Amino acid sequence: MTDEKMYTFWLCNKQGIGIKKITDLLCFFKEAEYIFKASKEELMQVRSLKEKDIDLLLSGQDEDRLKRDYEEMYKKGIQFVYKKEEQYPDKLRFLQDAPYGLFYKGHLPQKGKVSVAIVGSRRVSHEGRALAQRFGKELAEHGIEVVSGLALGVDIAAQRGAMEVPCGKTFSVLGNGVDICYPAQHIEEYMRMQQYGGVLSEFPLNAPSMPYHFPMRNRIISGLSDGILVIEAKKGSGSLITAETGLEQGREIFVVPGSITNPQYEGGNELLKSGACLVTNIKDILDGLGLFYDEDVENRKKKYEVMLETTEKIVYAILSLEPLHISQIAQMCGLDINCTMEALLSLQTKKMVEMAGGSYYMIKM
């Protein structure tokens, strides 16, 4: 633990001190420790601060309490990362309005991995829900991380789909403190996704969901993603705002088309008219992201997976024609090296996997 990280935690955990004021404070004081120890007169020199902001900052200048709060956070299984740290997500780092700090449970998105956000209506149709779950699952089967918001409808359907896949990774960005599951009925998914994925938020611990939090949350969903898939979005909906924010961030936009007479599809259809990629299957998304889709490999994998033991399925699910090192396979599967090696040897015996030199493995064709 560094003192600077602890003081940054204090700053980012202040309810009512948003990203704009945090940026202004750091621009003036340079480091969070100097903000923590600043006098009222010094804080008054930051023009964006109101009197209530200054009072809030001054009321928290208790170092012993700060240390207790910081240690208590980690005891609860919550972690904190801020922009100066190497593990801070690269996809967010260079955004103009990137959150300075993130609270998270589980893991952060893996650096260098492709990720796709799936967003859409909370009041989704049966067909839309099934499509969200299908695309979430198929993206995870291709090793793509699925990002969404844990909300009712499209969000949770897509994330459930991703979690059907052994080692499928999905990440929820919350519009409240990361220690709160909202909506509460998704507590099972909230807990499960922390095993291979994670839940994260820029909002302070214990912060409730507020209407103005969600547009802020949405910019992180799009920011963490290489592409955004829209399924059922009304005109002016939060999902449409996420897609438009993604466009500003340079992300690829994908849309499942719908009836021109149904308002539920109006927002998505407008995106298509503006040049978004029309999606009817997983190949459309992979093509749009410049990724390779091999139908023979997919058919072969589906054929053989029914014959495998649980650990073998987990390992086989992440393999492709691209060789992977055994240590990388173990990490992606959440297995130790011995279990991974045992599964790979069994798969080699079944002539489903082959070595590609050294400790690299790939599907055998």
Image: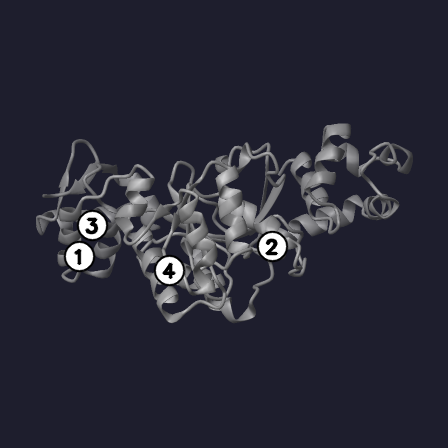
Which residue type does callout 2 highlight?
Answer: Phe
Of tags 1 and 2, the one toward the viewer is 2
- The span from disc 3 to disc 4 (Cα, nearest Å) is 47 Å
Of helix, strand and loop, which one carries label 3? helix
> Who comes first in sequence, dot 1 or dot 2?
2
Which of 40/74 is in front?
A: 40
**N-term mark: 4 or 1:** 4
Between circles 4 and 1, the one closer to the viewer is: 4
- Residue tagged 4: 258
Query: What is the CA distance from the residue labelled 1 to the residue labelled 3?
Result: 21 Å
Quarter of the image that includes the N terminus = top right
> Label 2 vs label 4: CA separation?
25 Å
Which residue sits at x=52%, y=49%? Answer: 242
Amino acid marked by disc 4:
Gly
Q: Report the side of 22 relative to 41 (left or right).
A: left
Q: Earlier in the sequence, mark 1 or mark 3?
A: 1
Q: Residue 361's quadrant in the figure?
A: top left
Q: Which residue is mark 1?
A: 302
Q: Position of residue 68 (x, y in %)?
A: 71, 51
**Does the residue at mark 3 contact the one at mark 2 (Cβ under 8 Å)?**
no
- Left/right of residue 187 with respect to residue 314 in the rendered view: right
Q: Which residue is mark 3?
A: 342
> Please, what is the three-letter code of the amino acid marked with disc 1?
Lys
When the figure is inspected, residue 17 is found, relative to residue 136, above or below; the finding is above
Relative to 182, 43 lies left or right? right
The CA span between labels 1 and 2 is 38 Å
Q: Which residue is mark 2?
A: 214
Q: Which mark is residue 241?
A: none
Dot 3 or dot 4, earlier in sequence: 4
Q: Amino acid at mark 3?
A: Glu
